Image: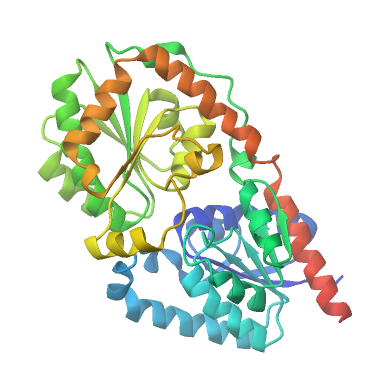
Amino acid sequence: MSSKRFMIIAGEASGDMHGARLVRAIRKRSPDAFVFGVGANAMQGEGTRIIVDSRELSVVGLTEVISKLPTIYRAMGLVKKSLHRLRPDLLILIDFPDFNFRVAAVAKKLKIPVLYYISPQIWAWRQNRVKKIKRLVDHMAVILPFEASFYRKHGVPVTFVGHPLLDRIPPAIGHDSNRYNSEKPVIGLLPGSREKEVTTLLPVILQAAQRIDNGLPAVKFLVSCSTSIKEDLLEDIFRQYAGSLDVSIVKGPVEPIFKESCVLVGASGTVTLEAALHGTPTVIVYKVSPLSYWLGKRLIKVDFIGLVNLIAKKPLMPELIQEDASPQTIAETVIRMVSEPEKLRQLEKELLGVRELLGGAGASDRVAKIAFDLIHRSERN
């Protein structure tokens, strides 16, 4: 079989990680496959030729995109040129819908098959986008169990491949119960992987930490620092808001924070699902611009914003949204949770049970198989 060309578009930090694992799975099947596209360090580390750094494109909320429009348009131009010039055998899109739909439309005109891995959350809001997906995408590879039934209902070819986090996070056997020792609690702070999230949430979370520090004895804080966030940005925020807190910055992988913390305070997103797979109780905080929130309230069709709560169909993780994501409310919620260690141990068991709802490990290998099947089908037609 001649070597195949794959273009992968992953617009965010989590997509870059999932994309990297997919590149690895593709290369297991075809070591000389040529992979290029939009991504960051993780995909580049697997040998992907990066034409646009995804960190330049990352935005949060419905209005924040405006300030990055020139960068986004420039990136779109580079992607279109690469599609025409390099003519991949398959285009693989990872979430990032508003950008990726436009790329899919170009690929469709060029008769390049399109695989969409990790669905946009169209089941939550703007559900009419499923018509666009049906028109532009050859196959959906979805990672949440309820997504497959949604797409089947709308006549879109779909496979539930399981969640890629299961490839990376082995089944937990529970944690040392000492982590729920309220005399020396460790609180993990996860302000997000996007610059806008960090500048919005980290000041609020650190102000909450000051209140927690006043209410709990000998508390220690661990702050996750994504590799996508510039150090000088963090230093500025810490200078203003950290005060005399006992706080350590953990760069790169978040796993050490999951294992040591009795409670996490985290931005809404994939990281909260990772926390569940480690059995770590978490408070979800979500804050966007007032206009984004106003629009979102009128468009969003689901009961929860947290993936864990959506999958479990109940609020395993408290959600503090917009005005409720205040330093005082966050602090009160955390202090209450830390003061009830038996409830935390029970919650850990329930969170670990979420794993059973996410399919089996091997998502990246399943997506790679679908990718080669689509190429073979395209070659026959």
Which of 169 and 27 lies nearest the eye of the viewer? 169
Which of 48 and 243 lies nearest the eye of the viewer? 243
Residue 81 point in image, percent of width and height: 55, 87
Quarter assignment of residue 133: bottom right
* Residue at image location 40% in from the left, 68% down from the top: 57
Instruction: Tell me how many marks there are.
Output: 0
**Which quadrant does the C terminus fall into?**
bottom right
In the rendered view, does 308 fall on the left or right side of 168?
Answer: left
Quarter assignment of residue 338: top left
Residue 231 visible in the displayed image: no
Which of 339 and 309 lies nearest the eye of the viewer? 309
Residue 14 point in image, percent of width and height: 49, 53
In the rendered view, does 318 fall on the left or right side of 94?
Answer: left
Q: Is residue 105 above or below residue 143?
A: below
* Residue at image location 68% in from the left, 51% down from the top: 364
**Which quadrant does the N terminus fall into?**
bottom right
Judging from the image, the colouring scheme is rainbow
Residue 47 point in image, percent of width and height: 61, 61
Residue 379 visible in the displayed image: yes
Residue 260 point in image, percent of width and height: 40, 24
In the rendered view, does 288 fall on the left or right side of 261?
Answer: left
Q: Is residue 367 above or below residue 74?
A: above
* Residue at image location 48% in from the left, 74% down from the top: 99
In the rendered view, does 180 fall on the left or right side of 270?
Answer: left
Which of 109 and 291 lies nearest the eye of the viewer? 291
